[in-house]
Image (tube, grey):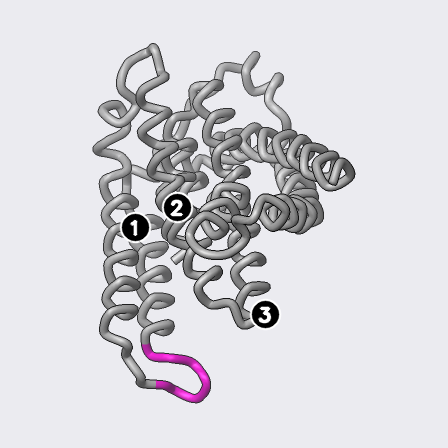
Amino acid sequence: MIGVWLLFLGSAAVTVAAAAKLSEYGDVIAVRTGLGGMFIGTLLLAAATSLPELLTTINSINQDVPDMAAGNIFGSCMFNMFMLAILDLVNHRGRILRRVALNHALSAGLAVLVGSFAILFILADVDVQIGWVGMDSLVLIALYMGGVRLLNDNPVTQAETALSPEQDEALPSLLHASLGFAAATAILLLVMPWLVRSSAQIADALGVSTGFIGAALVAVVTSLPEMVTTIAAARIGAYDLAIGNLFGSNLFNI
């Protein structure tokens, strides 16, 4: 059991380090490309930090445990919104939600819309398929792609940050940031299975591996990258990146 705890703590430490680098390089990419923290946070950073949920969900479905898959997805979404509230509470520079409310109205609305349709399809039990794919899945994919298009066309996401010559020289290049972002994402993909597996073994040893508690534990563990990247982004003042990551992760999860 000691070995399981050591594996859990070690993989969690690597996850924290990699997720912190994701925020750092994501902020550089947002500045270098001129796309802005909101767009990069909602799409690029959110997709990278949501990969653990995706892999865990696929693994749960392959093991014929759909309840665990659904619990992981919706539990992660709940935890992300909890993180949003906590971030607003502990920030001493003023209310973050008030500061970025207008910029993120669209991404927040899209997250609510996609989540509402997912709940509707669960309750309605739509049994319409095109080939092997359910109509409900196609609708959710279409909503996500449409949301990406809206965010890309939204003028708010295109705000550029002017840099002084000194700041520009100190900032890593776009290539450096892109390679660093890809490397941090790869590390997350390698480490997260160990983190999830060890947390599941701990839950099993404690007798809470099944039901709501087990699903909630897995959801919290797979949300660790979002939590770390959000805190790291907020600490460097990249609030659009932090909030965009949370709303974008909910969009990507659903």
For disc 2, the marked residue is 248
Which residue bears the numbered disc 1? 111
Magenta run includes residue 131: yes
Q: State the residue at coordinates (34%, 32%).
A: 84
Identify the residue shown where x is 23% and y is 48%: 109
Measured Cα–Cα span from mark 1 to mark 3: 28 Å
Q: Residue furthest front?
A: 207
Give the position of the C terminus as an image quadrant.
bottom left
Instruction: Look at the image and tell me in which quarter the N terminus lies.
Output: top right
Percent x, y for residue 126? 28, 79
Left or right side of 169 for 137 = left
> Is tag 2's residue or tag 1's residue first in the polypeptide sequence?
1
Kindly tell me whether residue 47 is visible in this rendering.
no
> Which amino acid type corresponds to the residue marked 3 in the rendered image?
Gln
Q: Secondary structure at mark 3?
A: loop
Whether 9 is drawn above or below 90: the answer is below
The amino acid at mark 2 is Gly
Residue indicated by mark 3: 63
Q: Looking at the image, do the residues carrying marks 3 and 2 touch, with CB atoms under 8 Å apart?
A: no
Using residue 177 as the reference point, say whether residue 48 is left or right of it: left
Residue at 51%, 67% in the rendered image: 65
